[in-house]
Amino acid sequence: MKTYKITFITNSEQKQPFTHLFKAESARDARAMARLHYQWSSSSYLIQGGEMTASKRAKELGLKSLAQVSELTGQSPQTLINWFNDKPELFNIVLLGCVMQKIKEV
């Protein structure tokens, strides 16, 4: 299974786009899960998605790379990838800690 980032974009000007991560076998399955989860039809919302990786998630939060996260935490890149896949809450907390550490350096 892979993790996919699905972005929801409404046709209405009242709502802002937002994203959610889904674990699925394919991007198509992830989009279907998103529709079921939020009970929306594809005609109401444009749903964009692609595979999310540990490195992409780190970059999305403003870090340079997964290697940078590895340096800041002392954990191997493979351990970080495992956390991303198996313990996403822990991985996100680690990333937020790295972001805070980078902010303090500035």
Image (cartoon, helix red, strand yellow):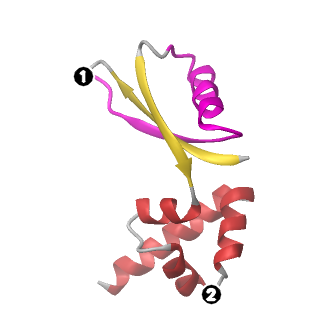
At x 53% / y 65%, what residue is drawn?
Answer: 55
* Picture quadrant where residue 79 is located: bottom right
Identify which residue, 61 or 6, lies in the foreground.
6
Amino acid type of the residue tagged 2 in the rendering: Gly
- Say which label, 1 or 2, has the lower sequence index: 1
Compared across the picture, whether 101 is left or right of 94 comes to left
Amino acid type of the residue tagged 1 in the rendering: Glu
* Residue holding disc 1: 13
Give the SS element for disc 2: loop
Compared across the picture, whether 61 is left or right of 89 comes to left
At x 57% / y 29%, what residue is drawn?
Answer: 31
Compared across the picture, whether 62 is left or right of 83 comes to left
Above or below residue 85? Residue 68 is below
Identify which residue, 105 or 81, lies in the foreground.
81
Question: Residue 92 appears at what percent x and percent y?
Answer: 57, 61
Q: CA distance from mark 1 to mark 2?
A: 44 Å
Magenta stretch in the rendered image: 13-41
Category of crowding for the residue at label 1, using alpha-carbon neighbours closer than 10 angstroms: few (below 14), some (14–19), many (at least 20) = few
Category of crowding for the residue at label 2, using alpha-carbon neighbours closer than 10 angstroms: few (below 14), some (14–19), many (at least 20) = few
Above or below residue 34? Residue 11 is above
* Residue holding disc 2: 74
Quarter of the picture containing the C terminus is bottom left
* Picture quadrant where residue 73 is located: bottom right
Q: Are marks 1 and 2 in contact (CB under 8 Å)?
A: no
Tell me the tag on residue 27.
none
